[in-house]
Every structure is written in C-alpha cells, then in structure tokens.
Amino acid sequence: MGRQRKFTPWLAGITALVALAILLFPVYAVIVGSFENNAQLLGTHYNFFPPTPTLANYRNVISTQGSHILSSLIIGVATAILTLAIALPAAHALARYRFRVTVAVVASLLVAQILPSIVIANSLFVVYHKLHLLNSYPGLILADASYAVPFSILVMRAFMLGLPTDVLQAARVDGATEWGTFVRIVLPMSRSAIITVALFAFLNGWGDFIFALTLLNGSTLQPITLSIYNYIGVFSSNLGAAMALAVFAILPAAMMLIAAQRYIAAGLTVGSVKG
Amino acid sequence: MFLIPAGLYVLFAFVVPVIYNLILSFEVTTPATIASLFAPWAGISNYKLTLLQSITQSALIRTLTFTVLSLLFQFLIGFGLALLFNLRFPLNKLARSLVIVPWLLPFLVTGFIFRFLFQLEAGAVNQVLVDLHLIHAPIGYLLSPGWAYVTVLITNIWLGVPFFTVLLFSALQDVPPELKEAAMIDGAGPWQTLVRVTLPVIRPVIEVTFVLGFVFTVKVFDIVISLTQGGPANSTQLIATWAYNLSFQQFDYGAGAALNTVLLIIALLVAPIYIRLNRDSLRQG
C-alpha cells in the first residue's frame, strides 16, 4: 500500500503528460507548420521541427490579411458588447423578480440554446436579403450573438441569484432606483461572471464560421475564419500562409487561457458555452 | 423593461428564423424568389423530394452513428481523464487548464489543422504510423469515403473531450470522500466503488453532459466543411452540411429548409430532458 501511494502520483503524472501531448499535438503542429515553406509542408514527409525556420508566412499574412484580422476583432468585440447589453438587464430581471413568465422565459432560453445555427442561418439569409443586411457588420454581429445570448442570460441569472439580497434591499431603502441598483450594485458585484460571459461571447464572434459563410459573400467583409476556408480551396498553393493565419486565429484563445484562466474554467463548468 | 432587449432579440434571432424556416420549407423556392419574402405554396413536396433522396437518407443515418460514436468515445476518454485528474500528481492544475485548449479553438481552424495532419503525404498521422510500422504505406484518409468519415469522427472526438473532462472532473470533485471511504471499509474494491458509489452520485452531471454533447454533435458543421466539404462523393455529409449544400450550393432554399426542420426536430428531442435537468434553476427566483 505504502509503495503504491508513492508510485501512483508519478504514474498518473506520466499518463497525463502523454494524454496532453496527444491532445495538444495539433496546436504544436500548426505552430511548427507556420514556420515552414510550402515545399516542406507538402513534401514527402512530415517535419516535427521546421527544417529551415522562416518568417515569410507571417510577413505574407500581415501584408495581406491585416484587414481580415481587424474584421474578426471588431466582430468579436461587438458580439461581446451586444451580448452583455442584452443579457445583463434580462438576467437581473429574471433573478430578482418572480414574474409569472419567469419560468417560461428561462425554459425558452434553454430551448434557444439547442437550436442549430444552420437553421437560423438559412432563414436569416433570406430575411437579410430583404433587409439589405447581407455583407454587413450589423447583420453578422446580430447573428453571431445568437451563440452567446441564451447561455449568457442563464449563467448571469444563476450568478445573480447568489448575490446577497440584503445589500440590494438596503440600496432600495436608501432610495436607489431599480436602474441605479442594477448599475451601481448588481453589476460591480457580478464582475467575475460578466468577464466569463464576455470572453466566451468574444470567442464565439471571433471563431464563427457558419454565419460568415452564409451571410457574407466574402467580397467586402471577410473575417479570418472565412480567409482560412478560402485558403483550403487552394490548399497546395498557400498552405504556409494559411498556417500562420491559423496561428493568429488561435491566439485569443491562448491569451485568454493564460490571462483569464479561472474565468474560462468557470465558464466551461457551468455548461454549454459554445454554439 | 429590463427584459425588452432580450425579448426583442429572442424574437429576431430564434422565433422568427424558426417560423420562417417552416414557411420556407412549404414553398417553391428558386434563386428568383429570394428577392421576395414569400414564394408560391409547395405543400409537402420539399419534404417528400428531400427525404426521398438517398444522400439525405444516408446523411440522416450517418449523423446518428456519428453522434453515438462521438459521444461514446468523448465520454470514455473524458471520464478517464477526469478520473486521472482526480488523483494527486505534480502539475495537476496546469495539466487541467491545458486540457481545455481543443475546446477553445475555432472549430473551422480545428478542421483545417486536422486536414493537414491527415493529408496523404507529409501528414503527421501517416508519418507516425509508418515509422511505428503499424501501416506499410501512407493512407489517403481524406480520399476514401470510409477513412474520411473516421477522420471527421476523430476530429470531433478530439474537440469534445475537454468538455466532458471538465464537467465530469468538477462532478468528481463534489463526490463526498466519506462515501468512498465508507465503501472501501465495507470491502469494495476501486472498481466497485466507482460503479456503485461514484457513478450514481455524478449521474445528473453525466446526463447533462450527454444532452449538451448530443446538441453539439447533431449540428456539427464547421469541421466537416473544412476537412472534406462533405466529400468524397458525399460520404461525410451530415444533416447540417447537406442542408447547407441544398440551400447555398444548389440554391434550393425550400429543400434546405425542409431538412433544417428535420434537424430542428432531432435537436429538440432532448429539450424536455434538458429542461427537466434544469428544473432546480427553473424553480428558483
């Protein structure tokens, strides 16, 4: 028993290391690939290290994809802002007041979470065509928020239900309006949940492909997911540049994991966070 | 007042698209009719024509097997990792945070990377398998129908494992240690403790994980488009990608909408279970 106790941590650690190596290998591969040229990427054997590391792919991406990276950033940030603007007040109302409709609203949000994006995309395409919202930031951002809005309201409501009610009541007694209580007390106390929700809404907008593919024609406005997809069509000619662009595409996730790890873990634990 | 923006948004992004999808599915649609919001009535012909197509039928069956196999392997691997992380070992916390990575990447990028890993020449998978003498010659994974399906499946399992791991791990953390100790004292081995004590305790979380996993998997789209675009010869078409193909590549929006309705019904099959699992949060407030 004693020997087993000493042995187990190392065995578990090594098993975890092997599992991680397999799970993270694709990320490693795309980073290595981004430093290789096309001949190496499409040669006769796979390179575990770049034989002659080059920054040419990154130079290529920065000179040709800058506007697309900017578009993805705008879409991600705007999706996060729109999601918060919709979800925060709604979560507050659903957490504080027992409306007769509260149960129905929460249940319908659970159902909304389930709806496949392709169904929404197919309809929105026809509706947008009529409203002239195709190929536009507002149209795409409104669609992208559909990943995060139901989830965000549910998560924020669950969090706000846990806020101490006496603080909120004290504010009320002091004559604060509902809006004042919400802005000055509820929101500051919900900071960590707000960060979690905002991060995932950003990642949803940043990583969206289905709405970008269906609601844009790629001429004027093109986020990087669409750029990478277009590279696939001409796989052999530009694989190196596509690799470098893919590294850009996974950068926000990596940065968030480092900077905001506990929020990410919190978001995952509460459940479905990706569309 | 506070609910107005959310109410309007739900109408715009969910209620209207679902109802409009239903309307579209009963209309005769051509590229020309897209200019107007409404087209001539088609009765159930969209449903009949689409569902009688053999590609549609195999996409339906394929989505089913794909979902079952994905969830099975995601659960087995995810639960194994959760049990592993439940043990004490050096750098456990760091390992747990890194395990999330596959889930955070844009799905399209995941498909793109796996396309590179599974390519015929200079692909890492072939290279490793040949070097280990597990295969004699490189396999064209994305060129043969059977292998292409397996490749999409492996990719989907890879990106879903973190989700299962994290949820099941947090459930394992909540199992009271006294319960396990009591079982051990009663003479239960590790396996019996797992099956008789741990699994029943975390069952609600397992159910939620499977329900959400089901919802994610029946609508898989991005990785198929970036890995195979549904090919070769439609051998990796799932419901969502085939509906996209009908609407946006064949410009038959009515047929796409009809298939979308079927996808919607399949996804909504788990809605009652999902709502029931969330009944505690429904009762609050």
Image (tube, coloured by chain):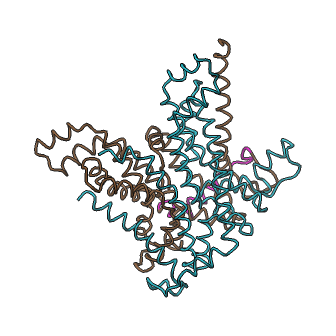
Residue A153 in the image: x percent, y percent? 36, 52
Q: Is residue A64 magenta?
A: yes
Image side of residue A28 versus residue B170, left or right: right
Residues rendered magenta in the picture: A48-70
Point 20% across, 36% down: residue: A166
Residue A106 in the image: x percent, y percent? 36, 53
Quarter of the figure with the N terminus of chain A = top right
Which chain identifier belongs to the cyan chain?
B
Point 55% across, 42% down: residue: B100
Query: For this rendering, which residue is in front, A209 or B49?
Result: B49
Q: Is residue B80 magenta?
A: no
Residue A17 in the image: x percent, y percent? 65, 32
Check the image and report above or below for B82 versus A98.
above
Q: Tag count in the figure?
A: 0
Furthest toward the top, the residue is A2
Which chain identifier belongs to the brown chain?
A
Check the image and report above or below for A111 versus B88.
below
Q: Main secondary structure of the magenta part?
A: helix
Image side of residue B101 versus residue A260, left or right: right
Furthest toward the right, the residue is B136
Query: For this rendering, which residue is in front, B60 or A12?
Result: B60
Point 32% across, 44% down: residue: B284
Image side of residue B44 versus residue A199, left or right: right
**Residue A42 is drawn in which quadrant?**
bottom right
